[in-house]
Amino acid sequence: MENGVISTKAEGFLSRMALNDNKAGMEGLDRDKINKIIMESSKGSRFYENELKKEEQVNQRIEKMMLQKAKITEQHLKKAQAQVDRMATELERSRDLSRVIVHVDMDAFYAAVEMRDCPELKDKPMAVGSMSMLSTSNYHARKYGVRAAMPGFIAKKLCPDLVIVPTNFDKYRAVSKEIREIFAEYDPHFQPLSLDEAYLDFTDHLDQRQSWPDTLRTHRPRASSTATGEEQIELPQETVPEMKDLSPVLFEDSPSSSPCLLDSTGFGAAGGGFEVFGKSAEEAVREMRFRIEQKTMLTASAGIAPNMMLAKVCSDKNKPNGQYRLPSTKEAVMDFVQNLPVRKICGIGKVSEKMLNALGISNCFHLSQQMALLSLLFSETAWHHFMQVSLGLGSTHIPRHEERKSMSTERTFREMSKTEEQLSLCRELCEDLAEDLKKEGLKGKTVTLKLKNVKFEVKTRALTLPYAVATVDEIFAVAKDLLKTERDNESPLPLRLRLMGVRISAFASADDKKPLQKSIVGFLQPDKTDSSCASQGIHQKMEKEHLSNHSFQTLTLAPLPLEKHGETSDASENDLVAPVEAHASTSGFGSTVSERFTCPVCFRLVETTDLTVFNKHIDQCLSDTSRKPNQIAASDSESDVDLENDHTECEVAGRRRGDSEVEEDKAKSSEEMDSSGAEPQEDQRSSKNKSVQMALSIDCDNKTVTSQRPQSCNNKGPVLVCPICQLTQDSNDLVLFNRHVDLCLNQEVLHELGGQASCPINPPAVTNFKALGKDVYPMRLRDPPSSPPSKKSKGLGPRNTIDKFFR
DNA sequence: ATACATACC
DNA sequence: TACTGGTATGTAT
């Protein structure tokens, strides 16, 4: 019976663990043999045991679903079918076949780069990664079943000759930049999905291309070798003071600024034959791939289709080094889709596949046939997605870059159980995270601690603060408490961890910060009737703000040198590599582009165009100033009580160095520890003058609140809600309310300035890049080594903390 | 809001 | 010896 159990489990096991021949390059290999080896390498490990457990959960989910299914009557189905049909009609009406969407994907990207740079690897099976985990493998290795996301030690068993090359992200990033420059010429608003992959909307390019002369569609191979270059590539942006073109040059304009062979092939081109590409979508995409190959010596594959969902599938079809075009007709689309295995669809992974399979659904034809059933068994979002897919529908326009929603860092290490080690690691993670947050000028309200124990069980614990935080101490204060709570829960057993991570989310910048900053900008530069802090104005404000940010950025951020004419959008790469200083100074203060800036602290004009200089000035101002909105409230006015309360809450942020105050809190609950840790910082009390001054200035300059408020909320009871802190105000006295809003605004700004004198605006709307250079799969290298508990020993800081913390 | 699971690269 | 890291989103409570 033991056997029975094992074999049952083993069967389930396969679906989650077994080789995925889903990917390209895996045809005709001995799957059974491979699976056997994978199995034998894994069996008995903690990882494996955990996989079994997860598998079991999935099985139960499926069982549950099947029970549901058994309860479904013909009636139900009929009704559901009617709804499905209605929706199908609806969706059909929205079908848009007019766009030409392209998905490009580099072939075995990391592996290809490494092979390019090390010819000895060319005919060997190789993979990029480590003995613990592989990022990708070359096609030779794939024949053995070696693939991405497989641990290296197992891969070695499958293929003893496998060469494992460590990852070199700087290199991949540099190549990524090169290909993105090419992408941008076909679609300045392309959307990168990762270093090696992107969606492009070719529609506009193709329109213009129709009137291009041959010369613009002519390219020639270049002889020069990108191959050896790997050091010279990174960081060309150090100082590129002058911008070639402020305005993007359009394709159809002057031939000199259009893509032509002279430019694109570079100077030292000892070029042989030219190639003239046609005007069709296929030709344009072929041209793009050609240019990628010329430029990087790496190949890409592409899919061309009327929407993103299909393009993505298509790019896989003729991989590697191929492309596939799905004609823009309903017939072609439907035909294509119906034969598609569900697993090929982006968003349907192992689990969904298994659940669908349990219903007898393995391809999209089944999917469409079973839609009524699916609508009864799956969530609305899920079956709507299925519905779209089964009709071959997908996004026809590439969404604008979205703001990042979270940022995190995590690390795996050998078993760690000691309190001090865990704490100092936690602190290290917070340090890394704070550093990254700073780079993008973000602050978030929710801090999440992630823990994985040696049994591979993952836990997350989160806490949402009433204010946004960004500094190490602030984040650590929360993470540490979450960790402590977990330890307490587990005690007397220790937490035996193999991974720890810290994430921050609920960023303030998205909704709060932006309108806020703009209002501040309005205050500081009272040329406009702006000042916007009334909640009504926020939307219109946003638009203006984008414009303003955009122009500001255009003029201040150093553009990257483009290989060619300026068609490349000014947006993307700038955001990716924009120097921190430039970001920092954009904080929303300089708002208008000008020869000088108004210091938000001392209100003097600073005569410089150099943002670094300006920042220094602000830093200087801040360093002799301290700020404390609480104090402002207290001293500046007899303002309402709830205002003070708000601030008390909001100021809990500050956790000064060390946490040395926790000492006498032994008897207190953890909440009390929190608030005790939140006392005002002594050093901040010293001079509130500047703060007061600022508060007053803002108060004076801010006409808008006073003038707009009365109309919108006059007649009713106390329903004033502060647009900044979102709290309903007890008083409906508009003067008090205005004061409250002003102070809230103030507080936000000062809080931001307080941290590091830098609070970059978010990437403006023109941003292309998703993760701003962090879109790195699968491993991001922050600091070179910093492996396990290689404490960066911040003097006594962590030590103190440790001692106090877990007593 | 929190926790956990799924998915993608 | 050894099974990642970063982000988004869905689902359940």
Image (tube, coloured by chain):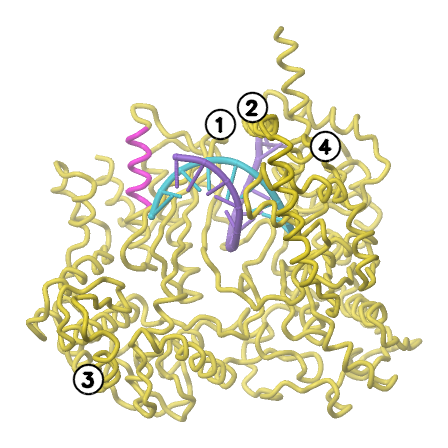
Chain colours: A yellow, B cyan, C purple
The residue that disc 4 covers is A360
Q: Position of residue A680 (x, y in %)?
A: 15, 59
Going by the picture, which residue comes out furthest to the front?
A: A75
The residue that disc 3 covers is A697
Q: Is residue A439 above or below residue A791?
A: below
Q: Is residue A715 above or below residue A252?
A: above
Q: Which marked residue is nearer to the observer: mark 1 or mark 3?
A: 3
Q: Quadrant of the C terminus of chain A?
A: top left
Based on the picture, tell me whether residue A481 belongs to the magenta stretch. yes
Q: Are marks 1 and 4 on the same chain?
A: yes
Task: Read off the chain for label 4.
Answer: A
The crowd level at tag 3 (other Cα within 10 Å; few <14, some 14-19, many 20+) is: some
- Which of the two residues, A777 or A694, is positioned nearer the viewer here? A694
The quadrant holding residue A484 is: top left
Q: Is residue A506 above or below residue A589?
A: above
Residue A49: give its label: 2
Q: Position of residue A644 (x, y in %)?
A: 13, 63
